[in-house]
Amino acid sequence: MLTRRALFATPAYVAIRRVTVERDQATAPHDVVVVARRIDDIESFDPAESYRTSGGEICGNCYRRLVAPDPAGSANVIGDLAESWNVDAGKSTITLRLRRDVYFGSGQPVTAADAAFSLQRAVILDKRPSFVIRQFGFARHNVEELIQAVDDYTLTLKVPDFDAAPSQWCSEPRFILNFLSASIGSVVEKSAVLANQRNSDLGNEWLKAHTAGAGPFKLASWSANDHVIMDANPYYDHSCATKRVIIRHVADPRMQLRLLQRGDVDIARDFDMEQLTKVHDHPGYHSVQAPRACSMMIRMDGPWGGFEDPQAEFKLSLVGQAIRWAIDYDTIGRITAGAWRVNQSTKVEGLFHKVHEQPFHKDTVRARNLMATAGQLNGFTVTMVHSSHAPFADIARVLQENLAEIDIIVRLLPTESAELVAKLPVRDSRLLLLTRDYDHFNLADNMWGYQFVEVPSQMRGDPLAIMLQRNAVAVLRRNINGLSIGPGVDYPMYDQITKA
């Protein structure tokens, strides 16, 4: 069995199955940080594919981008790999000049060829997050022509023809830069990725379990539903106070609290109200928190029987409204206090559109009237799929009770987070209770809120009801400082953490 002492000392990690914590070795070295959090949603560490919370956080620590969101929260970007850029007079070409002092974890310099390759492969692979770039008109047939390295440290992005972009704002160069600050804009090391490609997959299979970035860390080991280990990039241009980060998969917040109390972990990331109450004002702990650009919602999925007549869309919109007016938001807010707050808009606080809205409240009479108008006075039965982790199970039970009052009988189907994610593209469920994280500059999300959507057939994946916004909270032992978190899934950074 691998002891914690061996875990800290051993340079090779690939054979690790479990990160074993020994009580008599509870204090980690000063340059090693141990984190407890739920990481069962990791699918890939390829920034062209990763689209979930935990994977995004690892990518944020292992990769860098041409530009980054302004930490002040403005609708502008700041330079990261790019030291400067300009747009030509015709607003058709963006020219970026890269820094010359940035190196990948391999020691190789980051060049414009790496940046061009990274953006091109994101479009060519066409994985789920590729829409962030493709929406501007970049496509497999044109991306290699439109995104090119002029020399080792100069990159040009030509704006696609207006007709190729879905809307006028997509053709604005400044919006292209904004979107490149998302995780999909991460720059990978071209030579390392191509050396590990299989069947012309541009290294996608290899990057599922490896990293090839220039961030403060590089992936050392990953075991699904068990642990992630990141080691400091020795070539990073800033000194990392933390040399190793061990993230242990601990799904239960109560277990996270016990591990924190025993000193087996330094930071806990998934406390709910019960755990936050227990550590509140305790001299042994302190917290770091920020509004997270993440909403909890109910989403319609799959075919809905009884709504296929010519007035189906109208009836569905009425049922959606009925559900929104049936929910007891106050109760849900109380059972999630500290970790979540009621916010019924996708224009969440923490982005440059800082909105807090609550236009709906529980009104059972109004909800029943809407059901009657929709021809559903006798209601119907539906399955709701939800994560088995806290606080989703408790929220699902409240929703089950609320909807029963308007004769919508809900059968609850708890599942693991990864399984819930796998169900999303299949569209074989009726209702999904899930969360959605927003890209920092995703204007499509933040210009038009979803709270009043009427659920037409082409938008069946949009939410029936938005209920909560996440409040990201990390609880640290009193000797731990320097963790930064923010509104995006890729904002938490570990490189400046210190241990007294």
Image: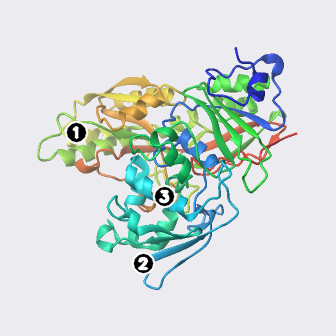
**What is the C-alpha distance between the residues marked 1 and 2?**
54 Å
Residue 21, compared with residue 462, is above or below; it is above
Residue 141: % across, % down: 32, 61
In the picture, the disc for residue 372 is 1
Q: Around disc 1, counting alpha carbons within 10 Å, would you say few (fewer than 14), some (14 to 19), or many (20 or more)?
A: some
Q: Around disc 3, counting alpha carbons within 10 Å, would you say few (fewer than 14), some (14 to 19), or many (20 or more)?
A: many
Residue 353 appears in the picture as rendered: no
In the picture, the disc for residue 92 is 2
User: For the point 59% across and 69% down, which residue is it?
Assistant: 153
Q: Nearer the viewer, mark 2 or mark 3?
A: 3
Horizontal placement of 450 versus 225: left or right?
left
SS for dot 3: helix
> Could you tell which of marks 1 and 2 lies nearer the N-terminus?
2
**What is the C-alpha distance between the residues marked 2 and 3?**
20 Å
**What is the C-alpha distance between the residues marked 1 and 3?**
56 Å
Q: Nearer the viewer, mark 1 or mark 2?
A: 2
Q: Nearer the viewer, residue 54 or 331?
A: 54
Residue 144, compared with residue 59, is above or below; it is below
Quadrant of image for the C terminus: top right
Seen from this angle, which residue lies furthest bottom?
A: 89
> Could you tell which of marks 2 and 3 lies nearer the N-terminus?
2
SS for dot 2: loop
Amino acid on which disc 1 is placed: Ala
Horizontal placement of 480 versus 464: left or right?
right
Amino acid on which disc 2 is placed: Ser
Residue 114: % across, % down: 54, 58
